Amino acid sequence: MLPAFISGAQPVTKVAAGYFHSLFLKSNGSLWGMGIEYYGELGNGDAVSGRYIAVRLPEQVATCDVTMIAVGNYFSLFIKNDGSLWAMGENTYGQLGDGSSNNAKRPEKIVASDVTAIVAGDSHCLFLKSDGSLWAIGGNGYGQLGDGTYDNASRPELIVASNVTAVAAGYNHSLFLKSDGSLWAMGDNMWGQLGDGTRQNKSNRPEMIVSNSVVAIAAGQLHSLFIKSDGSLWGMGACSWGQLGGTNPYNTGDPRPKLIVASNVTAIAAGQSHSLFLKTDGSLWAMGFNAYGQLGDGTHNVLNRQPEQIVASNVVAISAGYQYSMFVKSDGSLWAMGFNSDGRLGDGTENATNRPVEIVAGDSTNCNINPLALVVAESPSYNLISGKILDGGKICLSFVGIIGTKYALDRSFSLSPANWVPQETNSADSFGALILTNTIDVTTNNFWRIRSVPLP
């Protein structure tokens, strides 16, 4: 199967900022990386035991067919079009999931098919399958795998059998959403990052934190963020640097979810001690620790307790790493700011920057990713889609399907409750590529999904 959009410029579509290295995808499905190459985390085979290699400019890791990426501490994960899960890098805690503790300098296949989403923490990872099941691998010293033990797992373990729609992995804690909008958490809770009202250090079974209306989640080193269906942003956990937007002036952490922004938030990212979010107008906002310029506001003011606007418009994807940040604009350009030791920003230097720096140029002639279309079709019942702006006020939803399978495009004006209205039905072509288009009103019709349709 081929990506639905291939262009000469190959704009950036996804980005993942980790601890010491970064990954990004281009529209042709190629995977690129930069930063530290020590255990094989960039997958190019250059890792040398006991010696760091600094990759200061992006290098291509995989040529095509990659659809999703995740970055942990010295290891990386990605999914291909066929739903297979691949891993490379450090494997001390079994986080690569191959049944060993041997590091991998090249990508190795871990799961053959049906994987739809992945996230990575410090030494563990979580992934979803198409049946809505949640699986976990790796370090489990704080119960972050949620399997009821504190034992590491070098093979994927089934944690929840169905109805999981999204996952997030922090340093030693994990979050996930269910199809009813409930938020669940497990793992380290010393700073209240699980949001259960306590600061008990460990929780090795999933516990429900919010019963409904949660649509997006993010986990940082010691804090957590989530968005509700009304566009409000909430947070819990460590807040000493302002990463929760000033909801607690003390260093003890917020053990209960606290409201940060009342409305219009569409995407979130949580880093070591800072947070990023997008609003419906495509603006990028930041708060928290800023000693290395990771907020991108032109200063090195360490403490930032109130959200501040960094970019006014056209931001469509964000990622927060260890003291640095990355984002993608609607023209497919990739930008970065903050700590840059070993070249993790990918600008050819190791110099920190407190202003956004363009890493990969965009192309305004391409179908641009739509910052106004909130794509919610990421539950296991539906496959991932990406929205791009077309001329004439239309949005193009790109999707790679199964050859010959029919798919329907649905629209809803709200998620509370959702009322899906069928728009178009098309079949994937002989390459599995599928394009569905429909005119929208970007001020109201912001919720879309693609679903498979039974053949006659």
Image: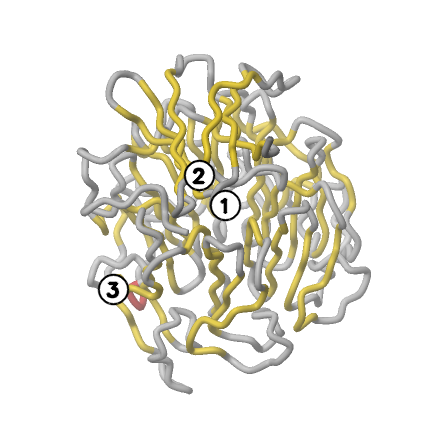
Residue, disc 2:
428
Label 2 and label 3: CA atoms lie apart by 45 Å
Tell me which residue sits at (59%, 46%) in the image.
Answer: 223
Q: Which of marks 3 and 1 is in front?
A: 1
Cβ–Cβ below 8 Å for labels 2 and 3?
Answer: no
Of callouts 3 and 1, which one flags the residue occurring earlier in the amino acid sequence? 3
Q: What residue type is labelled 2?
A: Ala
Across and down, in percent, residue 189 comes to: 70, 52
Q: Given the current orientation, which residue lies at the most extreme bottom position?
A: 49
Of callouts 1 and 2, which one flags the residue occurring earlier in the amino acid sequence? 1
Q: What residue type is labelled 3?
A: Glu
Cβ–Cβ below 8 Å for labels 3 and 1?
Answer: no
Does residue 403 appear in the picture of this structure?
yes
Asked which secondary structure carries label 3, the reply is loop
Of callouts 2 and 3, which one flags the residue occurring earlier in the amino acid sequence? 3
Q: What residue type is labelled 1?
A: Ile
Quarter holding the C terminus? top right
Find residue 402 and name its label: 1
Asked which secondary structure carries label 1, the reply is loop
Find residue 350 and name its label: 3
Cβ–Cβ below 8 Å for labels 1 and 2?
Answer: yes
Decide if residue 270 is on the left or right side of residue 362.
right
